[in-house]
Amino acid sequence: MEVFYYLVFGALAAVVAGLELGKGGKDRVATTSAFNAFKNNYVLVYSLMMSGDWLQGPYVYYLYSQYGFDKGDIGRLFIAGFGSSMLFGTIVGSLADKQGRKRACITYCITYILSCITKHSPQYKVLLVGRILGGIATSLLFSAFESWLVAEHNKRGFDPQWLSITFSKAIFLGNGLIAIVSGLFANLLAENLGFGPVAPFDAAACFLAIGMAIIMSSWSENYGDPSESKDLMSQFKVAAKAIASDEKIALLGAIQSLFEGSMYTFVFLWTPALSPNEEDIPHGFIFATFMLSSMLGSSIASRLLARKLKVEGYMQIVFSISAVTLVLPVVTNFLVPPSSVKGGSISVGGCLQLLGFCTFEACVGIFWPSIMKMRSQYIPEEARSTIMNFFRIPLNLFVCVVLYNVNAFPITVMFGMCSIFLFMAAILQRRLMVVSDLHKSSTKAQEMIGEDEPLNP
């Protein structure tokens, strides 16, 4: 069965290489040298920030276990991280809009570096503080950087359509290639060079420090609404009012929460799904395969966006495919009898699930640049970071509930629930497209009436 892993990885690598090398005129957009320099600077910073995040992933659970903590203790540490992101996310998002997005990005670097430093301590309370700092940093990572990019892109007068180029490139590298390289580099430091499980966290802190230096030296500041008359509570009210009064923003938030909630649940479930009887599976290699699948998705997304296809249209298909892939564990559990033998290699059902999970990760790769594109269109600039972190409240709450009850339900029930959420996301995406088209039609009609009025006094 080991050959199967190499075949899947090789096939994905060949497809990704073919897509990237085979881009024609329709898949490329003519831009300016000034924009290319701006894009490359952002992609470099984003890649460094994501490397700081990805380097920590492979060894965080293992490090906690090496300090002698059991599954329950480790679960509570993870809940602290997601809970921190849920509680403090909206506050730091509002501060980013008011105090400046560049400052928020620098705060992300400092907060995450401090979180990495806490990993040197075996004390539970210190590690708990580190998880809380990590939760705050995560909220900034997924709001402040994107908010800075959108505002700076518009401030410099670049074509709005070019935003999708930066999004696609950042996801292709930061969420794909960097994730693969970071996993291999973390393994090199911890295992091959013998520096131990803390070493990847030290490396992450170094990459974050380099990225912070680039931000401080080359980025300009931008704001949402810097007016002194608006305090933190006023920022919350502006964001809440925007969500409540605009169905498009509310739908976008619901879609994001449903998809990302399912995605983070998948992160916890894929290992027991592929090895229900403690089968010997190469976790690191499978993770790299998933990231390669994500690269494939972001490469497909860049082509779709370059051809100016309607995001609201093709994302309905993406969500539907995602829902089908996550129902596979439920189907295979009924169709392929599970083995009662402990150990061994991956089963036939596991192979089918792995192919489905790779398809799901490709959908994740399409999702990120596409949702970024929709957020840039629908979310108002004055409260962008605040609203984006409002979207993360139900997401983090959902993940905390799943983590707390991860042993209470069969794995098939959890996957079935995620599949239902993804079908719901597809339905809401359809509704968003209808509402968006109605809004555009009414706006166009009003403009035509306004142009006719001078002719009919």
Image (cartoon, rainbow, N blue to C red):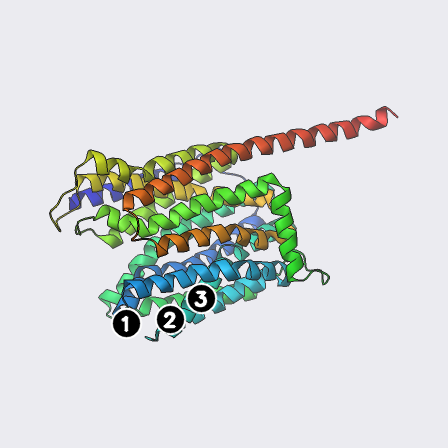
User: Is 127 located above or below residue 397 in the figure?
Assistant: below
Q: Quadrant of residue 219?
A: bottom right
Q: Name the kind of residue labelled 3 in the image.
A: Ile
| 3 or 1: tag closer to the N-terminus | 1
Query: Is residue 36 or residue 170 the one in the foreground?
Result: 170
- Residue 14 in the image: state x and y as whole percent: 30, 40
Residue that badge 3 annotates: 132
Residue in the image at 26% along x and 71% along y:
68
Three-letter amino acid code at the position of disc 1: Tyr
For the N terminus, the quadrant is top left
Q: Is residue 175 above or below residue 449?
A: below
Residue 81 quadrant: bottom left
Residue picked out by circle 1? 67
Which disc is residue 127 wearing?
2
Q: Is residue 34 left or right of residue 110?
A: right
Task: Please report the residue visible at 27 percent of the width from the left and 40 percent of the height from the top.
Answer: 329
Lower sequence index among marks 2 and 1: 1
Q: Secondary structure at mark 3?
A: helix
Marks 3 and 1, how far apart at CA: 19 Å
Between the residue at mark 2 and the residue at mark 3, the CA separation in whole angstroms equals 9 Å
Determine the residue located farthest toward the right in the rendered image.
457
Q: Residues within 10 Å of mark 1 (few under 14, many from 20)?
A: few
Q: Toward the viewer: 329 or 20?
A: 329
Task: Point out the residue furthest to the front here.
Answer: 408
Mark 2 in CB contact with mark 1 (< 8 angstroms): yes
